[in-house]
Image: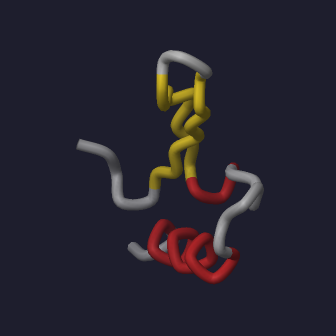
Amino acid sequence: MLPRTCVLDAAWVESRGWALLEANAAWGAGLNGCDAAEAARCIAEATRA
């Protein structure tokens, strides 16, 4: 099970399919193709006590 505020980097590998590259804390993720509003929501969730 992953933390609610974890983001995953995935990549398409030709002839193999999808692969998980890494998992990061939400605030350490780039916005490469991400919905910025959803990323902000995830970061806000990570800051709740």
Q: Is residue 25 left or right of residue 28?
A: left
In this rendered view, identify the residue nearer to me: 3 or 20. Answer: 20
> In the picture, residue 30 is in which quadrant?
bottom right
In this rendered view, identify the residue nearer to me: 36 or 19. Answer: 19
In this rendered view, identify the residue nearer to me: 7 or 10. Answer: 10
> In the picture, residue 22 is in which quadrant?
top right
Could you tell me which quadrant the C terminus lies in?
bottom left
Residue 46 x %, y %: 48, 66
Where 2 falls versus 20 (above or below)? below
User: At 65% from the left edge and 73% from the top edge, which residue is drawn?
Assistant: 35
The mark total stands at: 0
Where 43 falls versus 29 (above or below)? below
Could you tell me which quadrant the N terminus lies in?
top left
Residue 27 x %, y %: 66, 58
Check the image and name the residue furthest to the left. 1
Residue 39 x %, y %: 61, 70
Check the image and name the residue furthest to the top. 15
Where 21 falls versus 32 (above or below)? above
Q: How is the image coloured?
A: secondary structure
Q: Is residue 23 left or right of residue 49?
A: right
Residue 36 x %, y %: 69, 76
User: At 57% from the left edge and 70% from the top edge, which residue is drawn?
Assistant: 43
